[in-house]
Image: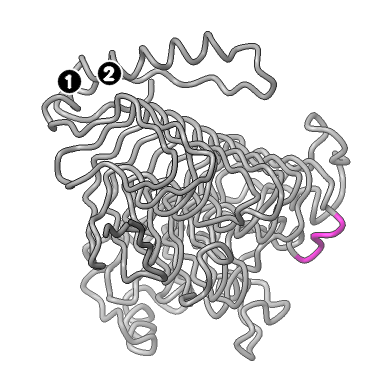
Amino acid sequence: MLAVTNARMKNMSLLDRTVLDNELKSEFGEENYELLPVGEGFLISVNNIEYLVEKDGKVSDGNKVEESNIEYAGDLSKGGQYNGTTEDTAYRITCIEDLVTWTNNSNTYKNKCIKLEKTLDFNSTASYKNAKVKTTDINENGKIEELITELTTGIGFKPISDFSSTFDGQNNEIRNIYEDKIGGAGLFGTANSAIIKNLGVTGRIKTTGCVGGIAASGSNLQINNCYNKATIFTTQSGTPYYSVGAGGIIGYGGTNTTLRINNCYNFGNIESGTASGGLMGTCIGSTEPEFYNSSNLGNVKGKYAGGISGSSGKKIINCYNLGTIEGSEHARRVKWE
Amino acid sequence: MKAASTHGGLNGNSPISVKNSYNVGIIVNTSQEKPAGILGYSWHSNGLDDEKCYCIDNVEIILNFINNNKIHDTKICTQEYMQSQEFVNELNTYVNTYNEEHKNDTNFVSLCRWKYNVGNYPTFE
């Protein structure tokens, strides 16, 4: 067994894949390491320890990867134990492949109860049934690469759309979600007449449209006991404040509906050229968003910007903001006598 | 002639009612108007009912508003006060009253109690 230390990893030339590959080969031998493009950097596995190398050459501490105890990809991928008709019989998500199956078959699972059985990390092979399988060009870069690479580069993960049931994260996290796309972005693209609860999200989400750490948009939606640590960004600007937004929890609340956010937190930085809020970007005027027992600790920047809501809302009760709020130029100037 | 900002500690621009909430985040203003500790710009033809809102004394005004907005016990506070047990007690007084008065409401959401953090701002218990 090779005694790999983090210090040794950090001495390597990390910015060039070819150089890095040669150094790893020389150091550990060709059979004893794996190098996978992940996000804007690389994932190096040596002796069941994974090191994430960022694009600036920064190397994470080694993360011991336990042998996968995923006997089978969960119900969504393989079918099996549950039928998703109630919360008790909710489909179980146990690996990243289940999330991919869900998003590829959103209509099938639209009205099914679903639970997240464990924390899943897009950047860790331990969260996959088989991170190295090559199937389709998910990230739309013209190449078929390993699944972990497909989901963390290019356009990355495709949001789950049209969810209309109950999702329970069971106090687990979706870590290192990565999206860089056109249109609505978030773990969920749209969630209508739904309940989403007990979930944390980390990573980076960038889009040209509405964006939220939990959901890009939603209506008649309850989000309880969730938090966002992902960096949220939309290139949108110049659109009306009530049509596009960026929020830590949800980007945009739909028309003529209720939206209740309770006991939610945002730690991620939020930025847009339109409405940005720590919890919600914006909603159309007829929607009645309510925020209870929630807070923002991230920095929020937008044309319209607020610690809880960027624009529009009905109630903010028992909430607080600790983050920096930066408002840019006006979309419109409001004047009165 | 007055002008309103559209960025605020809790809300940027909306007809929203804010209760028992606080902001201590820095508000950076790149527009010509004043930022607001609580609401950037609030508008509603029927008026709003904002009460028990607090912001730290690093902003010039608490909220911009027009029409019939009502403000009750909304104020700018010092850091010392907002990190005190007294402030926590004030927040929890509202929580107790609200929970008692609304417990039979449809879709009632129970408000969380606040806790005192030595040398820091209140968080939820």
Q: Magenta residues, as a range?
A: A104-108
Q: Nearer the viewer, residue A6 or A167?
A: A167
Please give the count of numbered marks on the rendered protein. 2
Kind of residue sitting beneath label 1: Ser
Which residue type does callout 2 highlight? Val
Q: Are marks 1 and 2 in contact (CB under 8 Å)?
A: yes
Residue at (72, 47) in percent of width and height:
A71
In screen coordinates, is A240 left or right of A82?
A: left
Q: Please give the residue where the numbered disc 2 appears in the rendered image.
A: B88
Which sits in the foreground, A138 or A181?
Answer: A181
The N terminus of chain A, quarter of image? bottom left
Q: Chain of mark 2?
A: B
Chain of the residue that carries numbered disc 1 in the rendered image: B
> x%, y% of residue A125?
55, 61
Q: Residues within 10 Å of mark 2 (few under 14, many from 20)?
A: many
Packing grade of label 1 (10 A; few <14, some 14-19, many >=20) is some
Quarter containing the C terminus of chain A = bottom left
- A114 lies left or right of A304: right
Return the residue nearer the eye: A167 or B3: B3
Residue B7 in the image: state x and y as whole percent: 34, 56
Q: Main secondary structure of the magenta part?
A: loop
Pointer 1 and pointer 2 on the same chain: yes
Residue at left offset 73%, top offset 61% = A161
Q: In the rendering, which numbered label is found on residue A202?
A: none
Q: Is residue A113 visible?
A: yes
Residue drawn at 15 percent across, 39 percent down: B57
Indicate left or right for A15 with A179 as reference.
left
Q: Tell me the element at label 2.
A: helix
Mark 1 lies on a secondary structure that is: loop
Q: Position of residue A238 (x, y in %)?
A: 47, 77
Cα distance, mark 1 to mark 2? 7 Å
